[in-house]
Amino acid sequence: MYDLELDLINKCCFKSSQRLAACEQLIRRVQRLTDDTKTSVEINDDDHGKAILVFTVVTLVFLPLSFVASFLGMNTVDIRNQTWNQALYWIIALPVTASVVVLALVIGYKYETMRDYVERYTGKVKRE
């Protein structure tokens, strides 16, 4: 080969190896960015899960209280003839709220066990 051609081939090989190294570096950087993005998404999902948990707890507590207040607030008799006071509200509202919270916890934490029992009792095959 001629010296000029050999020199050109060497320059092309050198440039190609530089571009290959740059591409490999970019691939490593993209992999790091992908991992960072996955971590950020997981953190956001955890935050959303916490927000949903707080909303659920608030709903579990205040929905029964609201129902009892609405139920007792219906004017079925003249308000001047009512014999009960606010104590009746708390006598009814606290057990109802506690029952709803306990029921929600039992369903939330024992759902799989209850479903397996029902499937065994009814003879249905568990779906995978």
Image (spheres, rainbow, N blue to C red):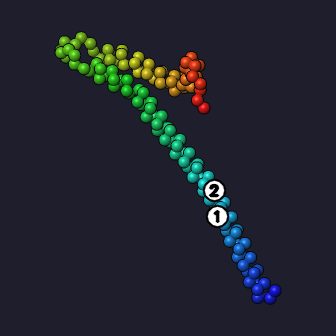
The image quarter in which residue 43 lies: top right
Q: Position of residue 32 (x, y in %)?
A: 63, 56
The secondary element bearing badge 1 is classed as helix
The residue sitting at 26% across, 12% down in the picture is 84
Amino acid type of the residue tagged 1 in the rendering:
Leu
- Decide: is 86 above or below 126: above
The image quarter in which residue 2 lies: bottom right
The residue sitting at 55% across, 23% down in the picture is 115
The residue sitting at 36% across, 19% down in the picture is 93
Q: Position of residue 102 (x, y in %)?
A: 48, 21
Would you call the spot at circle 2 few (<14 residues within 10 Å), some (14-19), or many (20 or more)?
Answer: few
Horizontal side of residue 125 vs 5, given as left or right: left
Label placed on residue 32: 2
The secondary element bearing badge 2 is classed as helix
Judge by depth and name the residue closer to the eye, 21 or 73.
21
- Decide: is 83 above or below 110: above
The residue sitting at 81% across, 86% down in the picture is 1
Q: Position of residue 6 (x, y in %)?
A: 78, 84
The mark that comes first in sequence, 1 or 2, is 1
Judge by depth and name the residue closer to the eye, 40 or 34.
34
Give me the C-alpha separation between circle 1 and circle 2: 10 Å
Q: Position of residue 22 (x, y in %)?
A: 67, 68
- Decide: is 9 above or below 36: below
**Residue labelled with disc 1:** 26
Label placed on residue 83: none
